[in-house]
Image (cartoon, rainbow, N blue to C red):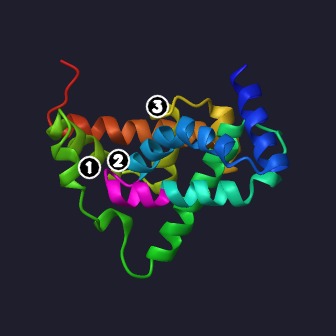
Amino acid sequence: MNQLNDISLVAQVVVFRNTKAFDQLVKKYQSPVRRFFLNLTCGDSELSDDLAQDTFIKAYTNIASFRNLSSFSTWLYRIAYNIFYDYIRSRKETADLDAREIDAANSAEQENIGQKMDIYRSLKTLKEIERTCITLFYMEDLSIEKIAGITGIPTGTVKSHLSRGKEKLATYLKQNGYDKN
C-alpha cells in the first residue's frame, strides 16, 4: 500500500506537475535521507542538509525517469548515493572526507553526545563503501538486495562490506571502552 501511494504521488508529479504531491514525498523521505547523509558524513549536519537538498532537487528534475522497476525509496536512495559520491570525488582534490571535523554544534543539542561522537569516529574508520553499506543496512534498515540495487554492487560484495565494516566497528568500539560486558 505504501509503495502504491508513492507511485500515485510520482504519477501526479509527472502527469499534472503537482508540486504538492512532490512535497508529500519530500516530507515522507527527508528525515531518512538526511539521516543517511548524517551517518555518511560522520555527523556533519550542514553538509547533510545540503546533500539532502541536492538529492530532492535531482529527484524532482528527473522524476519522469522513475520507471517503477524498484520502489521509489530505492530509486531515491540511489540518487542520494550518487550525490554523495559525486561530492566525495569533487572533494578528493582539496580534502579527504576523514579529515573533516564532527559537527559539534549539532551533536551538542543531542542526548548521548559522547556515544554519538564515538559512533561517528568509528564510522570514519571504515572505507566509504563499507560506511555506505553499514549505514543503509543497520541505520536505514534496508535489505541486502536493496543495498545492492542502490550501490550497483553484487549482493555477495554487499555482504562482504557489511562483514568487514561490522568487524572494524566492533574492534574500534572495544578499543574505546565499549566492551560487551
- Near-viewer residue (32 or 144): 32
Q: In which quadrant is the C terminus drawn?
A: top left
- Near-viewer residue (42 or 176): 42
Q: Are marks 2 and 1 in contact (CB under 8 Å)?
A: yes
Q: CA–CA distance between discs 3 and 2?
A: 12 Å
Relative horizontal placement of residue 154, taking residue 40 as reference (left or right): right
Q: Which residue is mark 3?
A: 138
The location of residue 72, given as percent across then percent down, is: 71, 39
Residue 116 occupies quadrant:
top left
Say whether residue 34 is visible: yes
Q: Are marks 3 and 1 in contact (CB under 8 Å)?
A: no
Q: Are marks 3 and 2 in contact (CB under 8 Å)?
A: no
Q: CA–CA distance between discs 3 and 1?
A: 17 Å
Say whether residue 150 is visible: no
Q: Which residues are magenta?
A: 41-51
Tag 1, which secondary structure?
helix
Q: Amino acid at mark 3?
A: Tyr
Relative horizontal placement of residue 178, taking residue 49 as reference (left or right): left
Q: Which residue is mark 1?
A: 121
Tell me the crowding category of disc 1: few under 14, some 14 to 19, or many 20 or more residues within 10 angstroms, Cα based.
some
Q: Which residue is mark 2?
A: 123
The location of residue 129, given as percent across then percent down, is: 52, 52
Tag 3, which secondary structure?
helix
- Main SS class of the magenta portion in the image: helix
Tell me the crowding category of disc 3: few under 14, some 14 to 19, or many 20 or more residues within 10 angstroms, Cα based.
few
* Residue 91 included in the magenta stretch of the image: no
Q: Is residue 123 placed above or below 95 in the rendered structure?
A: above
Tell me the crowding category of disc 2: few under 14, some 14 to 19, or many 20 or more residues within 10 angstroms, Cα based.
many
The first of marks 3 and 1 along the sequence is 1
**What residue is at 29 percent from the left and 65 percent from the top?**
100
**What residue is at 65 percent from the left and 43 percent from the top?**
20
